[in-house]
Image (tube, rainbow, N blue to C red):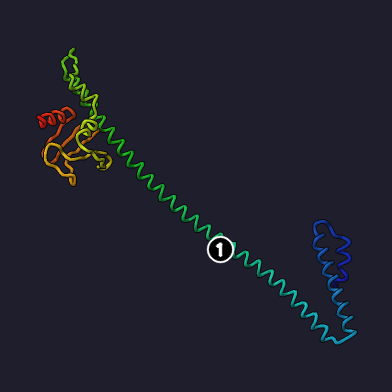
Amino acid sequence: MTLASIAPRLIAGKTPANSDALDDLEQTRAQRDTYLTALCEEAAHGDWADALLRHARAACARGAVVIADLQGRVDTLEHERVTLMQQQRDDTARIAELERTVRVDQRQIHALCYTRDAQDRHIGRLLHEVADLRRRLPRGEQHVMTPLDAFRVTHSIVDVVGQVVDLHEHQDGHRRYLAGTCPFHKDTHLSPSLVVRPWYGQFSCYVCGAAGDVVDFLQLIGGRAA
């Protein structure tokens, strides 16, 4: 059974599913018949070798066009592959950068949690001391705030000391403090020895030993001026 014998039956019974395939088959058959007819006509008027050579050259030319088209498609696919690989490398680098940022944020969160826990413990100790002092007071006795106590509450030690000393902010672990040249002895700007701790409301000098709260500082400054 040959292609010529089964093609009419295939064409007669074609369905929408295989319609395109049968149309391609018919087109290929027509091209083959046209090619054979042209070859026979040329052979009748000339040499078979010349006719075959011309048709072979034409076939080679068509094959070169097909090869060039396929090569263009291959080049396009290769370019797309390289582009996708570059995008993958960029995405990998971006993911690594985000992971580093997440790790830094996690360390900062841990540090803040540690600072908050330390502050909570400090507040707890202060509340315990206040409760202990209240228990020690005689019953019925009320604490009367003196003018000095009122001054300590209403005036920040940073503001008071900052009017006399040029303070600079420093970091000690997770706590912030301020330092400057001590006005109670001969100090240098290269190594300031006066330290002000706002969370305690205290100042201290590790060279001359001067220390205290905002009232003590004003008393020492007044005594030095006198």
Q: Which of 225 and 38 is in front in this view?
A: 225
Residue 181 locus on image (x, y percent): 17, 40
For residue 90, above or below residue 128: below
Q: Give the residue drawn at x 86%, y 74%.
A: 34
Residue in the image at 68% along x and 71% along y: 68
Residue 184 position, x and y percent, is 12, 36
- The quarter holding residue 159 reads top left
Q: Is 41 drawn above or below residue 169 in the view shown?
A: below
In the picture provided, is 3 more to the left or to the right than 74? right
Which quarter of the picture shows residue 208? top left
Residue 25 appears left or right of 209:
right
- SS of the residue at dot 1? helix
Residue 135 vertical position relative to residue 106 in the rendered view, above or below: above
Where residue 143 appears, as percent x and y from the top left, is 19, 17
Q: Which residue is drawn at 35% across and 43% down?
A: 108
Q: In this view, does 226 lie to the left or right of 157?
A: left
Residue closer to the observer: 134 or 85: 85
Screen quadrant of the N terminus: bottom right
Crowd rating for badge 1 (residues with CA inside 10 Å; few <14, some 14–19, many 20+): few
On screen, residue 218 above or below 18: above
In this view, the residue farthest toward the front is 226
Q: Left or right: where does residue 87 sit relative to residue 142?
A: right
| Residue 151 place in picture, x, y as percent | 21, 23
* Residue for badge 1: 82
Q: What residue type is labelled 1?
A: Val
